[in-house]
């Protein structure tokens, strides 16, 4: 093949490639700004122009599959429930309002959007065993806000009557997340393996005087299914806007701050630790026991 034929063949391939690019709408135009995650907030919109001087590319993240532990290799197991308080400095990523990489919303908006679009199933508020999925009607009631009564005066008669008003769901009312995890000593690898099983957002409930009544679970999500979804959304990095990780990496790497609220050790009734300083100390002791258990299994 002479040089002219080679040039002609190259031009032909480039021409075919441009035709495929133009006819296939699923192929992104690199000259246009691209978002790396589906928008989860209806009010959030990506920039219509190139926002910045960095030549960005779509961030396509995938998770590595979690290998199941064979029952024959599991020498010991304990179940632990933790609580994440988003008001702690280390957990500020949970309340970040969002951008094109985080999905245009906070973490709770990512979860709600996933359930609404049928990407994942939500389970009942107290169903951390994932036995009964919520239908969409029940889920809408969970996130539909709260009802309140207010006095309304008729402008003509002056008569005052009580009217029920539904408040919209406030994403800032979700101040905590609860996670359920297993600690398993794997004989095959000779180490303690920690796996998250479920995640549940907790919403603060206020009384008529705006005093905190307590935090209630909204719903439970099965983490192995949620993990695949979270790989598509990146976590806000307060130190560097460029270097980020996915939410799946964030949870797998345990970059969050949390405290233990309950374990399965000597707890047949499933009672939680007290919510005071003594409960925090008991939770710390429970984790210390787990760490010592790994050393103890090596000595056997």
Image (cartoon, grey):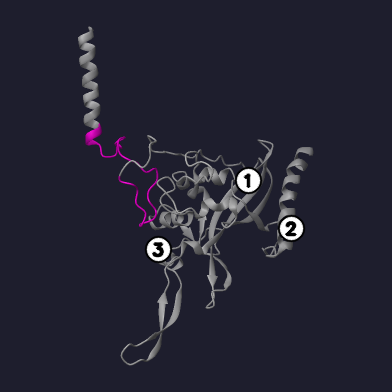
On screen, residue 28 versus residue 263, left or right, reads left
Q: Which is nearer the N-term, disc 1 or disc 3?
A: 3
Can residue 218 be seen by looking at this rendering?
no
Residue at the image point whose x is 44% and y is 56% from the top: 109
On screen, residue 54 versus residue 293, left or right, reads left
Q: Nearer the viewer, residue 171 or 50?
A: 50
The overriding secondary structure of the stretch rendered in magenta is loop
Residue at the image point whose x is 40% and y is 51% from the top: 104
Eyeballing the image, is 157 above or below 16?
Answer: below
Nearest to the eye among marks 2 and 3: give it: 2
Quadrant where the image shows the N terminus: top left
> Residue 102: x percent and y percent?
44, 48
Q: Which mark is residue 57?
A: none
Eyeballing the image, is 225 above or below 6?
Answer: below
Which residue is at the far right? 299
> Residue 288: x percent and y percent?
74, 49
Q: Which is nearer the N-term, disc 2 or disc 3?
A: 3
| Magenta region | 21-48
The CA distance from mark 2 to mark 3 is 40 Å
Residue at the image point whose x is 43% and y is 64% from the top: 139
> Residue 63: x percent and y percent?
49, 40
Q: Which is nearer the N-term, disc 2 or disc 1?
A: 1
Q: Which mark is residue 194?
A: 1
Q: Which mark is residue 136?
A: 3
The CA distance from mark 2 to mark 1 is 21 Å
Circle 2 packing at 10 Å, graded few (<14), some (14-19), many (20+), is some
Q: Which mark is residue 281?
A: 2
Examine the image and state in which quarter residue 209 appears.
bottom right
The CA distance from mark 1 to mark 3 is 32 Å
């Amino acid at each position: 093949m002479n040089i002219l034929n080679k040039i002609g063949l190259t031009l032909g391939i480039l021409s075919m490639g441009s035709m495929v690019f133009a006819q296939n709408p699923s192929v992104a135009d690199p000259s246009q700004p691209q978002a790396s995650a589906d928008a989860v907030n209806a009010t959030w919109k990506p920039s219509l122009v190139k926002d910045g001087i960095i030549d960005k590319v779509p961030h396509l993240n995938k998770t590595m599959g979690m290998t199941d532990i064979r029952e024959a290799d599991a020498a010991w197991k304990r179940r632990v429930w933790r609580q994440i308080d988003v008001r702690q400095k280390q957990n500020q990523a949970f309340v970040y309002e969002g951008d094109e990489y985080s999905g245009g919303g906070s973490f709770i908006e990512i979860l709600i959007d996933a359930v609404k679009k049928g990407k994942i199933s939500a389970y009942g508020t107290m169903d951390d065993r994932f036995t009964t999925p919520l239908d969409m009607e029940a889920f809408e009631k969970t996130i539909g806000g709260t009802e309140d009564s207010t006095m309304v005066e008729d402008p003509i008669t002056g008569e005052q009557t009580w009217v029920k008003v539904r408040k919209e769901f406030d994403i800032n009312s979700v101040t905590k997340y609860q996670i359920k995890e297993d600690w398993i000593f794997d004989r095959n690898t000779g180490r303690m393996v920690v796996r998250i099983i479920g995640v549940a957002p907790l919403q603060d409930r206020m009384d008529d005087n705006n005093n905190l009544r307590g935090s209630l679970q909204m719903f439970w999500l099965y983490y192995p299914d949620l993990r695949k979804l979270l790989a598509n959304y990146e976590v806000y990095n307060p130190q560097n806007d460029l270097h980020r990780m996915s939410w799946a990496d964030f949870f797998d790497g345990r970059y969050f701050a949390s405290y233990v609220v309950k374990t399965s050790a000597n707890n047949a009734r499933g009672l939680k630790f007290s919510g005071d300083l003594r409960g925090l100390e008991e939770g710390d002791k429970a984790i210390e026991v787990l760490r010592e258990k790994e050393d103890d299994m090596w000595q056997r």
